[in-house]
Image (cartoon, rainbow, N blue to C red):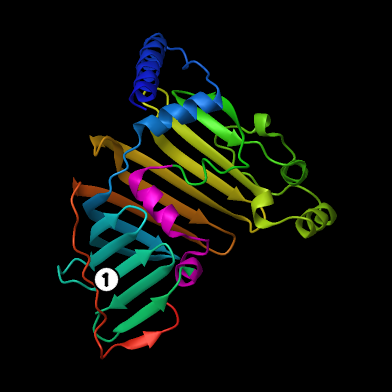
Amino acid sequence: MRAAFALILTALLLTGCTNMRRLERGKPIRSEGSGGIIRKHLATQANPDWAAMRLQIEADVDGERSGFKVNARLRRDSALWLSITPALGVEAARLLLTPDSVLFYSKVPGNRFAYRGDFVAIDSLLGTEITYDMVQRILLGQGIGLLDEDSKYISKVDGREHLLINKYKRRVKRLVGVKEREIAPDDSLSVAATKAVQERVMNRSDDDDLLVKRYWFDGLGYQLTRTRFDDLFWGRSIEIGHGGFELEAGGWIPHRTDITIASPEMTHSISMEISRAKYGRPYPMPFEIPQDMEHRDGL
């Protein structure tokens, strides 16, 4: 295992030096196969068993702006604990996510309530499907759906970054009118087919059949810098940008993340910045809903 990791690290360093020289000469980075890009990216990932982070969040959810601080504690693949504090500095809410549950309570005067359920409430709030794994990957700067069994990619160069686009089915081409290789890096995909074609394709498709995935990786360090999903079935898109990478917990973790969720009905944006982080030891996740709180079906 160590020998394989050393080989990947050596290849990453050699490729990085080559691309650095090309960029210094004003040339684009050298094109690579999708498999090699993914392997090099995986070698950069941090996978801490435990993490404690101090976050600053700025959100615009359906036109309503808010800013707050969050203390986050993560036990990998098990639980994410969040304590939410607005500008006044007093805890306003607490949230505990696990792979199959959502626990939440609000301490805001006049709006004290608790919620026990699953991710459906968060899905409804943001207008898209969210899972525990997605939240964890966003926090650690890892690709959502990158290693799905059925996902195969074409590789392109976009300036100083590698761009992977999933090879999609013929029915997607019928909707958008272009092949994967013809998509410009920043194209915002939309349905261009006639109503009759749209109806035929939609009736024969599931959600995943009409999903176009794009991933951008830094040409020198292979960190994931940007992800974009175009969901043609529901007419919405999600874009996730990562920056401010720091070497922590055995890999690179982004200290700045920007998320935009757009649909014909609404647009949400969330910006997150890590101001402090610690890794490697267990952290308590106290969560007890006060007995006098009203319980609701949704957040």
Image quadrant containing the N terminus: top left
Q: Residue furthest bottom?
A: 292
Crowding at dot 1, Cα within 10 Å, few <14 / some 14-19 / many 20+, comes out as: many
Q: Residue at x 37, y 9 (%)?
A: 21
Position above or below: 29 against 58: above
**Residue 270 placement: quadrant:** bottom left
Give the residue displayed 55% in from the left and 36% down from the top.
Answer: 186
Residue tagged by mark 1?
94
Q: Position of residue 14 (x, y in %)?
A: 37, 13
- Evaluate whether residue 214 shows in this view: yes
- With respect to residue 120, does 195 lie above or below? above
Q: Secondary structure at mark 1?
A: strand
Q: Position of residue 180 (x, y in %)?
A: 66, 34
Relative to 202, 281 lies left or right: left
Q: Is residue 299 visible?
A: no
Query: Of 281 and 260, which appears nearest the observer?
Result: 281
Q: Position of residue 7 (x, y in %)?
A: 38, 18
| 30 to 112, vertically: above or below | above
Residue at left offset 48%, top offset 60%: 130
Q: Which residues are magenta?
A: 120-142
Specify whether 236 is left or right of 216.
Answer: right
Q: Nearer the viewer, residue 285 or 139?
A: 285
Quadrant position of the C terminus in the picture: bottom left
Q: Is residue 130 magenta?
A: yes
Say what amino acid the circle numbered 1 marks.
Answer: Arg
Q: What secondary structure prevails in the magenta region?
A: helix
Question: In the image shown, does 171 or 77 lie closer to the viewer?
Answer: 77
The stretch drawn in magenta includes residue 164: no
